[in-house]
Image (cartoon, rainbow, N blue to C red):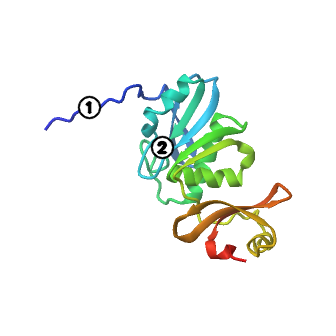
Amino acid sequence: MSEEVIRFPGARRPDRTRRVDAYGVGIAVYEWGAPDARPLLLAHGGFDFAGTFDGFAPLLADGGWRVVSWDHRGHGDSDHAALYSWQADLRDALLVMDSVGHEPMPIVGHSKGGGVCMQLTEARPNRVSRFANLDGMPGKWRHPDVADRERTYVLSGSGDVVVRGSIAEGEFCAFYVDEGRVTAALSVGRSDDLEH
């Protein structure tokens, strides 16, 4: 049986490949576009790899972006690790960002990549200029910078709670807004916690 090669018009492999050391785990990084162009990160979903963006990344690169993506640990050409965790994926994403630059940059995340980068955006908003989440779910971990008293106040209904979107099984992702200023971000809670 012969394998048929399917080509997508405009799709192309990355212009450059390299590796980032994530504390002993090699992360495969791919880039499309001019090395001196403004960077934009793409994060793939679970059970996937950066090659998923071979059709999308060239369009962005042709639009003037330096598109950077990576294979999550245990995916594609990145090393496999003895243990895996959401926090390790967050650290890997930050190391890839650091390898690109330290200025805020836009991120597009799909599925698991969207969830990881959503949490990265909440934890390090100074590193992200824009964020697009394509079907990504947030993690269930609270950020330590949201004090329990703030969480209690937000969930008590004492202030304005802006629900950012409905999530599976009655969960929500919300921000507390005080006089037009976000003062606390909650990753995940139960919708019945919002009832006054």
The one of 172 and 144 positioned closer to us in this rendering = 172
Residue 3 lies, in percent from the top left, at: 20, 35
Label 1's element?
loop
Q: Residue at x 32, y 29 (%)?
A: 7
Q: Residue at x 76, y 70 (%)?
A: 154
- Of all residues shown, which one is farthest toward the left? 1
- Residue 182 x %, y %: 79, 56
Q: Residues within 10 Å of mark 2 (few under 14, many from 20)?
A: many
Between the residue at mark 1 and the residue at mark 2, the CA separation in whole angstroms equals 22 Å
> Which residue matches tag 2?
71
Residue drawn 62% across the image and 73% down it: 190
Does residue 152 lie above or below 109 as drawn?
A: below
- Which amino acid type is shown beneath numbered disc 2? Asp
Quadrant housing the N terminus: top left
Query: Would residue 94 be found to the left or right of residue 45 on screen?
Result: right
Residue 89, percent across and down? Answer: 56, 53
Image x and y of residue 8, in percent: 35, 30
Which numbered disc, 1 or 2, marks the residue that appears first in the sequence? 1
Question: In the image, 184: left or right of 67?
Answer: right
The residue located at (41%, 44%) in the rendering is 76
Residue that carries the numbered disc 1 in the rendered image: 5
